Image (cartoon, grey):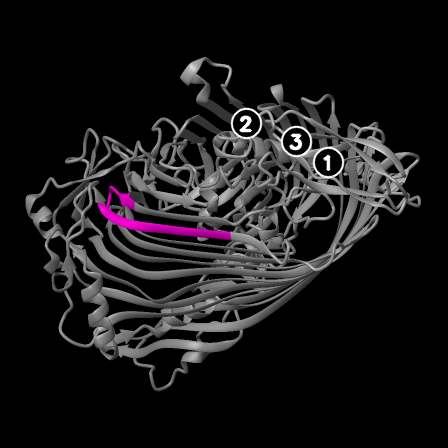
Amino acid sequence: MKHQFNFSSAVSLLAVAISLPLPAMAGVIEGRVSDQSNAVSLDGAVVRIEETGQSVATDRAGEYRFSGVPAGNYTLVTTYVGAESESVSVNVPSEDATIRQDITMGDDVALVDNILVVGQRGALNSALSKQKSSDKVITVLSSDAIGQLPDENVAEAVRRAVGVNVQNDQGEGRYVSIRGANPNFVTTTVNGVRLPSPDADQRQVPLDVIDSDILSSITVTKSLTPDVDGDSIGGNVEISTLSGLEQKDILFKLKGAGVYSNLQDELGQRYSGVFANNFMDGRFGVAASAAFQKRKFGSENIEVDGPDWVLDESVPYPEEVELRDYQLTRERLSLALNLDFQATDDLLLYAHGLYSDFSDQEYRSRIENKFGDPDYDDVNSGGTVAVVDAASGDEYEVDRDLKDRFEDQLIYSFVGGGEYTNDALTVDWSGAYSYAEESEPNRIDGGFRAKFDTGLFGIDIANPMLPQLSFPDASAEADYFDGSKYEFDSLELTNGVSKDDEIALAMNIRYDLDLFGVPGYVKFGGKARLREKSYDLDLKVYDGFDGDDLLLSDFSSLVEYGLERINPSVSPTALNEFFHANIDDFELNEIDTAIESTGANYIANEDVYAGYAMAQRTFGGNINVVAGVRMEHTKYSATGNNVLTQEFEYSEAGDVTGTLDPESVIPAPAVTGDLLAEDLEFEYDAGDDETVLELVRVYSQTVTSEQSYTDWLPSLNVRYDISDEVVARFGYYKTIVRPNLEAAAPRTLVEQGEDDVEGEAGNPLLKRQRAHNLDASLEFYPGNKSILSAGVFYKDIQDFIATQQFDDLSINGVDFDEVVTYVNLPDASIFGIELNAQQPLDFLPGLLDGFIVSANYTYIEGEATLADGREISIPGQSKHVATGILGYEKGPLDLRFAATYRGEYLDEISVTEDAAGNALDRIVDSHLQFDVSAKYRITDQLRTFIEFKNITNEPFQASIRPAGIGSLNAQFEEYGWSAKAGISFKY
């Protein structure tokens, strides 16, 4: 720890040393850099004053600004990837003069194609220019690159970036992982506003909520400076929408498409529109975008519950196999509106808003086959087929159930603020509000159960990733598929709402100045973020019906399912309508209802107050240093519930119902609190001549917790422009990630039996995870139109959080014999190598010069040490991540073919071991997906396109891997391929 402290202190001292101010001159040179048509602003162009060595990168509007320039004659040299450099002469007549010098680039590019800013090459030029000029390690996806492959949402667009992989849900990208870090280690901002998460138990933001068609650019930031939030170990995904001030002419885009899913054989639709323009002589900018999508799709799944396999018999077999069929209707509505007002030459005011609503109507048909209950049949088992005998041991249970769920996820954000510039001084301020919500109104989970006490039932593991049902007994097979054999078991009615909102206030002050002839600036500021997250669950459990027996045959339907025989299934319409029409006749289980409706609820508040100081210096015109320190003070408080289920049985000879007080023999509950529900039976059994007491009670106790701490987060970023084509970078920065709010909430589910107390618990004593991060890279831009780069990174993480099982532990005031909870592990680390290459093949002859190739690869090695000393890889971290894109752009034709690879990763840590003593962790297998798109330009404004996604129907697979056996199913799920075809218009 001592060497880390010394290094952090050294960086802090360096920040102070390079920030010492001197008075600045008042001369100003400013202007706009655009393409040759003067219609498109160039973001990321570098403008340098030859005589002083000062350089600056243009902003989104193509604007640049130098302050403190002495009177005299100067030469401005401007560079932008894909264009020849431009030099212009400028005269500053006096120290109080402001000189406007606009610059155009790309005079060497044919105006008819304008590949500097249009198409695949334009997207490459824009991205590389921003990356090359940045003080940090970033990857940029420009507007022309987003959605040009079959990317449904932000997550799918960003997965093309180097070092990024995406975790899917229902075959569509949802959570972003950067450099192997857990998605909870990644933050998301929209126009600088931090997005909260609608998920009840996570910090990670599901980026499938936001449609990719409304975006201007996506920037993946992998190294941090002190002027941004310091709670990101993986990195940040910055989503930008359009500004009207960026446009010199009106921008108007429309797109419409039909969407097809082959697995469900259903058609959907997708529409989007963008408008941007400026008014009042270019001082008032308006940009609005909207996107709507509705599509029907689904998946087919076979998975093993747990996953628990019986490994000590002649044929390994799963204890419980589930067959699942999903049918979904997904709707996504995304809206963005940006208003920017240049009130004066010195004052910019803005108001930006984003609204996104994402909903799923999901019907899941499922069969649960419980092979672990009956005895294994050695006689009839053999080869790859394991057989159990329902007449021996416990009954063979089969559940056929339905999930009828409408889930709605809502995210919106608003930010208003301004920027004031006066000579060398720039002050900006903002106030933002963001909100996220997930709701499940009137969700129904209902099922029917059959208990077979005779017959042979088998499972064939010839393909252990796709186990198949086997029926040695014909009569048992007939009963298995007979809906009249299945009686109503239970139904759950769920109404749950998760809310997460944040208010943020920020101010930054920057002052440009020279120190002993070295140009740069100092900057400091502060920010307050006030966050509240809560979850409120109302779940009612019904496990009986006061009327005639309810049979599956009364509610049956058929679903298409290609992996096995799944029918008869439960009809969602029939069950839903019958339940709501006869709800008073269903019998409420008060015990289970009390447990479920109380144990999950919590409310947490997290307030963060931050301040920072930093400085930038450019030495020798080509060494750029940014250093500083950020302080973040965190105040956390939460309220949850200890929920105890107490079960007790007692018997005494004879009839003592009149003399024995039941309370005198019932043990004291492990949790003292309010009694929510009770089921007590106290009666005399004449047959056995004994009095029997059976008790189940549910108690609830409100628990609160508080915690506060302060972190000092130094950082240093160095960019060395070795030549016009070669850039070297080094970065150090310290970051934190706070615990998931639900993990740190004082919530406890306790089960108290006669001899032990077991359960699961949140841990309000969790520490934040802290990391020291190092980055080094070398970037080569051959011919100023492509890139070859290599980089290494290392993250040393202290107090890494994981879930583990413990014996004899006291937590949240409860003494457990066995408990599963969240703990801080001693340490973890991530080491990686990033390689990236992007190259237009315009040196090839004839038609071949339209090819463009892009490839990136990331190697990641991560490890953590559990409390028991076992070393594991970082959960969610793939060792190998790669993307390759082959594009072709010539005349009206635009083709792209993409391959995305993600290696396997640890998904769940297990305490179960195989015969060799190896833990049977759940591993998500590697995934290779191919996508393709084709576009044809009919006119300068009109294009038609067709796209195919997951063309090889790559499934999602997870497994356990016992020694000597190989991979065994934990989950297999396939989604089919999808296609989209339509037309786009741009003016």
Magenta segment, principal secondary structure? strand
SS type, badge 3 = helix
Percent x, y of residue 984: 38, 44
- Residue 305: within the magenta? no
Q: 716 or 490, which lies in front? A: 716
Residue occupying image coordinates x 86% and y 33%? 73
Looking at the rendered structure, the kind of residue marked 1 is Tyr
Q: Relative to 976, is 230 above or below?
A: below
Q: Secondary structure at mark 2?
A: strand
Q: Is residue 539 above or below residue 936?
A: below
Q: Residue at x 56, y 61 (%)?
A: 815
The type of residue carrying mark 3 is Lys
What is the number of the mark on residue 707?
none
Position of residue 647 in the picture relative to residue 282 (left or right): left
Please name the residue that numbered disc 1 is placed on.
Answer: 732
Is residue 268 a member of the stretch shown in magenta? Answer: yes
In the structure shown, which secondary structural element does the residue marked by tag 1 occupy?
strand
Residue under the image location 63 percent in, 26 percent down: 791
- Residue 775 appears in which quarter of the rendering? top right
- The residue wearing badge 2 is 859
Give the CA separation, mark 3 to mark 2: 23 Å
Query: In this image, 814 relative to 549: left or right?
Result: right
Q: Position of residue 388 (x, y in %)?
A: 19, 43
Contact, mark 1 vs mark 3 (Cβ under 8 Å): no
Give the magenta range.
259-275
Quarter that holds the N terminus: top right
Report the residue marked by disc 3: 132
Please indicate whether residue 769 sits to the left or right of residue 645 in the image: right
